Amino acid sequence: MKTFDLSLYLVLDPDLCGGAEGMLRTTEEALEGGVTIVQLRAPTWKKRALAACARDLLEILRPRGIPLIINDHADVAAAVGADGLHVGQDDLSPADARRIIGPDMILGLSAGCMAEVRGADPALVDYLGIGPVWATATKKDAGEAVGLDGLAALRAATPLPVVAIGGIGASNAADVMRTGVDGIAVVSAICGQASPRTAAENLLVQLRIADRS
Amino acid sequence: MKTFDLSLYLVLDPDLCGGAEGMLRTTEEALEGGVTIVQLRAPTWKKRALAACARDLLEILRPRGIPLIINDHADVAAAVGADGLHVGQDDLSPADARRIIGPDMILGLSAGCMAEVRGADPALVDYLGIGPVWATATKKDAGEAVGLDGLAALRAATPLPVVAIGGIGASNAADVMRTGVDGIAVVSAICGQASPRTAAENLLVQLRIADRS
């Protein structure tokens, strides 16, 4: 049985963090603030650098039991022994990805509309990343924003755990959680912030507020 | 024992060929002209499209016994069951790549200087792609040109089979072969030519001329 906590899902961005060193520093600080899962996403990087960075991140994350998810590159995820892989609709299909990462690795899939949500096979996919909730500057090729109502409808259409992504910060995190998702994924709400630790803590406060309301 | 013939190595370029359909057409025609091995290289493509194109290419190549090599993406190579993978010095290391593709798939490695040629481990790597022999517009991030003398020296420094790449066409193919390499890799000498078949035939004529001289 795979166990993972999607509550506060940090997606690392090398540009916002200031390169590989910055991503390691951001991760260490954000972990102290309560991040529950971390994704390495560096779409312009070559794989040699990506694998090296992933191994450095695993040294930080593994002792604390926080999973590392690799974006897009099943080969890098398998080579470094990451905990998971996240694919988009244009990346390897979940079936092809499973051939590379095996049955035990966490597999996440991005979905932005009802067809994509319903098309996700729970026998292959472990969680969905649904969004963008709002338009975001961090991912240029993201689809149309689904909004809070759209997110609630998409969330209700799948039995899979769901993490919401796109334009989420402390000001709207509680509203997002009330749609019934299992967690929020953030990029710029932590990466590039003066204190990634404080930023993560402030997000966690909002998750608890949503939990009580 | 892996057997493959590096003599006339076609590297497909989606831009020069005019997309996926163009690459399939180019491949069919070039095969009639005598191409001995084919690489799919589409660095700007997402993996879903790359895997689909690779599967289409395998349908053309497999019945004729011509190997398909995938550039960079070990996960795509393994998922589609390609015959080989080609990595550069910034891609997955040969050791990491082998973890994904297993022991039986052909593994090629790009090398552009003595350190890279000598650093290639024959226990992991099946052939070297050495170049660029001359400057080329097809690959912007290629290193400095090695020239014919440089190629001969690099070729002599490795026990591995070698395919030369970079600026090679019918006018210089015989000179390149006389450095002792096992074959020539071409992109624009076949891709985008009015007749890929005639282009391949003309290159093969030069390989035979070099063989006799």
Image (spheres, coloured by chain):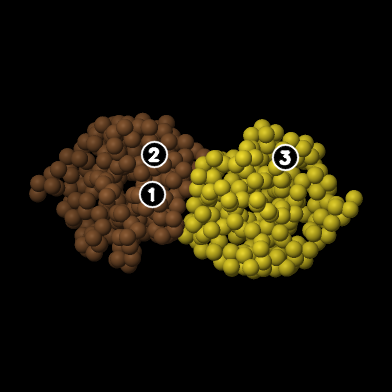
Chain colours: A yellow, B brown
Chain of the residue where label 2 is placed in the rendered structure: B
Query: What type is the residue that disc 3 sits on?
Result: Pro
Residue A60, picture quadrant: bottom right
Using the rendered image, report if marks 2 and 3 lie on a common chain.
Answer: no
Q: Nearer the viewer, residue A64 or A46?
A: A64
The dot on residue A159 is 3
Q: CA–CA distance between discs 2 and 1?
A: 21 Å
Badge 1 is on which residue? B85
Mark 1 element type: strand
In this rendering, the answer to whether B152 lies above or below B62 is below
Q: Chain of mark 1?
A: B
The secondary element bearing badge 3 is classed as loop
The image quadrant that residue A26 belongs to is bottom right
Mark 3–mark 1 distance (CA, rounded to whole Å): 38 Å
Residue A59 x %, y %: 59, 68
Residue A119 x %, y %: 64, 34
Mark 2: amino acid: Leu
